[in-house]
Amino acid sequence: MPREKGVPDDLELARDILDQQVVDREEIKMGRVDGLVLELREGQPPRIDHLEMGAVVLARRLSPRLERWVDGWRRRFGVRKVARYKAPWSDVVELTSYHLKLDVAALDTPTFDWERWLRDHVIKHIPRPLKGNGEEEEKEQ
Amino acid sequence: MKTVHLELLLGCKVHDPEGRRVGRILEVHAAPEGKDCVVREYLLGTAALLTRLGISAGRLVGLPIHREPIRVPWDQMDLSDPERPRLRCSVEELKRGK
């Protein structure tokens, strides 16, 4: 059967996918695979439905109590709109020994909510360097 | 749609139809099939963990012993209760079916 994407023919899911570095189509690091959801189908082998990323998913692996604690912390202080980012298997375009590439733009996903918040609330307010004549430098686009 | 979280399935004890403990799920073998990636078999026992780490129990202590993990085909694993996975056949039947 021809391979549809850059995924090896034989996969050990825990070894090859779980905790694997995730990158977007520009190879910008997005985090790691914290969870993997299998769909159980009647009379057919289970298939990978989606990957999950997020501190809450990672905490659940340790204990349900820690998951609730981390989720409560996220609700109170976090800026992420969702607790877990779900990437469907159809978005996976490549899997190698050093990364798992998704066909998405990292900046458009919830994984970059913190970076966006920092840009809008912190970086934006840092004074720009002055030119020789005392004017602020033009912001680079 | 019924789903199961792989990261929660790992480490779960598996019992046979008579309730005897067979081992823990330590690895899941899958393969791409068209646009999907489907599960082929579940690997049980410490040998599966050592396989995952790329070592064998024998080599770990300097002996030339090689233990194979228990390989359970996807259709012989009952995941209707993902916290208590059960085999649909006995371990002997699994070994005979090898």
Image: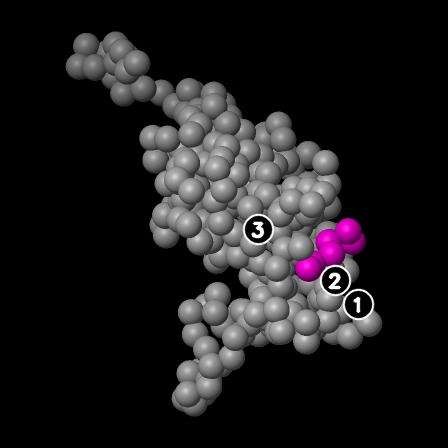
Magenta span covers which residues?
Answer: B76-81
Residue B77 colored in magenta in the image: yes
**Residue linked to disc 2:** B88
Front residue (pair B93, A34) = B93
Q: For residue A83, which quarter of the picture?
A: top right
Please say if the residues under marks 2 and 1 sit with CB atoms less than 8 Å apart. yes
* Quadrant where the C terminus of chain B is found in the figure: bottom right
**SS at badge 2:** loop
* Residue B17 tag number: 1
**Residue linked to disc 3:** B39
Q: Give the distance between the C-alpha atoms of the residues marked 3 and 2, in whole angstroms.
A: 17 Å
Q: Is residue B17 left or right of residue A122?
A: right
Residue at the limit of the structure toward the right, as seen here: B18
Residue at the limit of the structure toward the bottom, as seen here: B63
Q: Considering only order in the chain, which callout, 2 or 3, is on the residue closer to the N terminus?
A: 3
Chain of the residue under label 3: B
**What is the crowding at mark 3: few (fewer than 14 residues within 10 Å), some, or many (at least 20)?**
many
Q: Position of residue B11 (x, y in %)?
A: 65, 64
Chain of the residue under label 1: B
